[in-house]
Image (cartoon, helix red, strand yellow):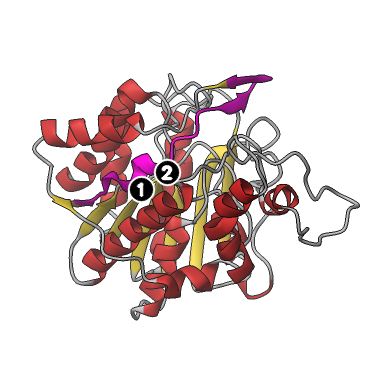
Amino acid sequence: MKTVYTDDHRLHFPQGELFGGEFVTPFERPSRVEYILRELKKRKMADFVAPAKLDMAPVRKVHDRDFLTFLETAWAEWSKAGYRGEIIPTGYAARGMQQRCPRSIDGKAGYYCLSMETAITAGTWDAAVSSAASALTAQKLVANGERAAFALCRPPGHHAHHDMYGGYCFLNNAAIAAQAFRDSGAARVAILDVDFHHGNGTQDIFYTRDDVLFCSLHGQPEDTFPYFLGFKDEKGKGRGEGFNVNYPMPPFTAYDVWGKALEDACKKIKRYAPDALVVSLGVDTYKDDPISTFKLTSPDFKTYGGRIARLRLPTLFVMEGGYAVEAIGINTVNVLEGFLDA
């Protein structure tokens, strides 16, 4: 299995994240990728491919043009305004307020941001572009006949909405790849999100569409981020009704319960009969993840990689979350190895 990767991810490294009322080193940090690379090399799976230049066509189909312009120009505007720190908005377009984009860069950030743990830095746009390019290059490998490919994306993407960033995400890599599959001839695409946190951005993008089936296994929103999406009764709208499937689960869920949800999702994907499968691969379901509450063990990741393989679909793995950095490589590569061994 080829891995698409670039060092450009290091361009995005905010120095602070608001967590528990304190500024801490962000959980989403460059070292996450280094542990994954190390494990791939250790297991002799180091077949690396550099991403091609980003094709903006599928990006523009899933993201709002003004939002993309904001992301590309935000740092220049922020610097021109005289601000010296990283971009963390101080106000948001909350309930009851006008949903109009302000002229001030601080206001713009609040308009487009859904959660303030996600700072923008001088290198954020370039890193987000390279991350999306990695997803698209891996997608092309699969579209051209590879059984599977792994896009080692950073920053991650599944929390990025059509017109909002947050949850460490700026461009929705999985959604962009799914759109690229559609553009290259796939009649139907399935997205399986196994990250601990609900893929709220992916749901938002495809909620009214029937050509992309979205299944998400995650912590129930009553207890965990993103809090305001991910409920079981969110099933799609209009043509998309029935093509959005959420599996919210309580804290301390272990594989006996989680695996049953995966089995149900796999059966739905099988019935949908997609031409390609995109897996939003977050490994923050691990028992020792610092910002998650599920209890999967490292062997569980290999088990469910094998279950995904038995769908017998062209499969693209897109890296999302996972913050127990010393185990992230083991757990990520366990999924890929389980897939290849099945």
Magenta stretch, residue numbers: 3-23
Residue 320 marker: 2
The answer to the question of whether label 1 and label 2 lie on touching residues, with beta carbons closer than 8 A, is yes
Which amino acid, by three-letter code, is at mark 1?
A: Cys
Is residue 12 covered in magenta?
yes
Q: Which residue is mark 1?
A: 153
Q: Amino acid at mark 2?
A: Glu
Q: Tell me where residue 312 appears, x and y as whole percent.
A: 25, 60
Q: What residue is drawn where x is 69% and y is 39%?
A: 227
Q: Which of these two is toward me, 8 or 186?
A: 8
From the viewer's perspective, is 46 left or right of 189? left
Q: Residue furthest right?
A: 96
Dividing the picture into quadrants, the one containing residue 145 is: bottom left
The answer, for residue 261, to whether it is visible in the render is yes
Q: Is residue 241 left or right of residue 57?
A: right
Q: CA distance from mark 1 to mark 2?
A: 7 Å
Q: Position of residue 52 (x, y in %)?
A: 26, 64
The residue positioned 63% from the left and 67% from the top of the image is: 66
37 magenta-colored: no
- Position in image of residue 190 (x %, y %): 43, 63
Q: Secondary structure at mark 1?
A: loop
Look at 59% across and 70% down and name the residue there: 65
